[in-house]
Amino acid sequence: MQRYFINESFRDQKFVRISGEDFHHITRVMRMDVGDPFYIVFENAKAASVKIKQITDSFVEADIIDLENEEKELPVYVAIASGLPKGDKLEWIIQKGTELGASEFIPFIASRSVVKWESKKEVKKLERWKRIAKEAAEQSHRQVLPVIQKPYILKELLQYSNNFDWKIVAYEEAAKEGEKSNLVRILQSAKPKDKILFVFGPEGGITVPEKNELITHGFEICGLGPRILRTETAPLYALTALSYQFELMR
C-alpha cells in the first residue's frame, strides 16, 4: 500500500489533509478516489492507515483509521559518511541505504574525491538527495526519513563524530591484510539506541593521512571481508551486517 510522509506530528487527530507534491501523486499518478486507503507517516515517527474522505482542487482529506504497531526502523542509529564519489553513485547509496535502514547520510570531500563540490549548486543537490531518500523511505515502508547533510570537509566530519557512540572507518588496506574481527566485535558490543558512524572512502579509498586523523579522533579500522568493494557497495554491506545482527539475530 502506498505511503506518504507528511510535515506534521501526530497529536491524536482524527483526519489529515495532504497537499503539494503528495496531493498530485495521490490524485494524478495513483489516481486514487474517495474510499481508497493508504499510509501516512508523521514527523514524530507515528504511522497510520488512512482512507480518503474527500478530494478537492488543492488537497486530499483522509480519515485516520489505525496506527501502525510494527516497528520498521533499525534498533540502532546508523550514519553513512561517504567520500564524494563520481556520477550518480551517491544517489544510489542514498536510495539503497535508505531501503536498508540508514538514519543519516553525510557526504564528505575526501582527498581522493574526483568530484569538485560547487556550493552554488548545493541547494538543488540537497533537494534532489532528500527527494530520493523520501521516495525510497516510502517504498520501503520506513517510519522515519533519513537526515541528509550537506557535504562536510574532513575537519567538520571529525568534529561531528563526537555525537556518536561507535565510529568505524572501512579501510581497504585492512581488508587486504585480513582484518575481520573489529566489525564483528563492535556489532556484538553495540546496544539498541546506540549511534554508529561508518566512514567510507570515494573511488581510490581513504588516504593514509585521513586514516591516521580518523584513528586519532577515536575511529576504529575495519575490513569488510576478503573482497574489495566499490565505494557504492561497501555502505550496503555494512547496513546488511547491521540488519542481520540487530534484527534477524535478536
Image (cartoon, rainbow, N blue to C red):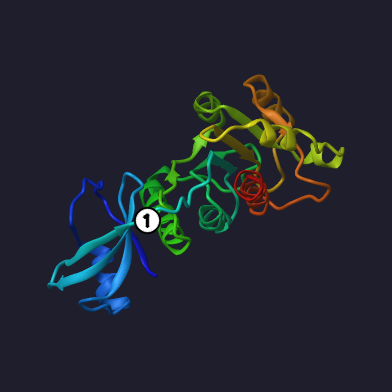
| Residue sitting farthest toward the right | 177
Q: Nearer the viewer, residue 84 or 28?
A: 28
- The N terminus lies in which quarter of the figure? bottom left
Is 103 displayed left or right of 28 in the figure? Answer: right
Q: Tell how many labels.
A: 1
**Crowding near the residue tagged with mark 1, few <14, some 14–19, many ≥20 C-alpha atoms within 10 Å:** some
Identified at 48% across, 44% down, the residue is 103
Is 196 displayed left or right of 131 in the figure? Answer: right
- The C terminus lies in which quarter of the figure? top right
Rendered location of residue 218, percent (x, y): 64, 22
| Residue sitting farthest toward the left | 56
**Could you say which quadrant of the image residue 149 lies in?**
top left
Badge 1 amino acid: Glu
Identified at 87% across, 37% down, the residue is 177
Q: Which residue is mark 1?
A: 68
Identified at 25% across, 75% down, the residue is 27
In the rendered view, tell whether residue 193 sits above or below residue 94. above
Q: Nearer the viewer, residue 155 or 162?
A: 162
Rendered location of residue 236, percent (x, y): 63, 52
Is 40 displayed left or right of 182 in the figure? Answer: left
Q: Nearer the viewer, residue 129 or 198?
A: 198
Rendered location of residue 220, percent (x, y): 70, 28
Label 1: state its secondary structure: loop
Rendered location of residue 121, percent (x, y): 40, 49
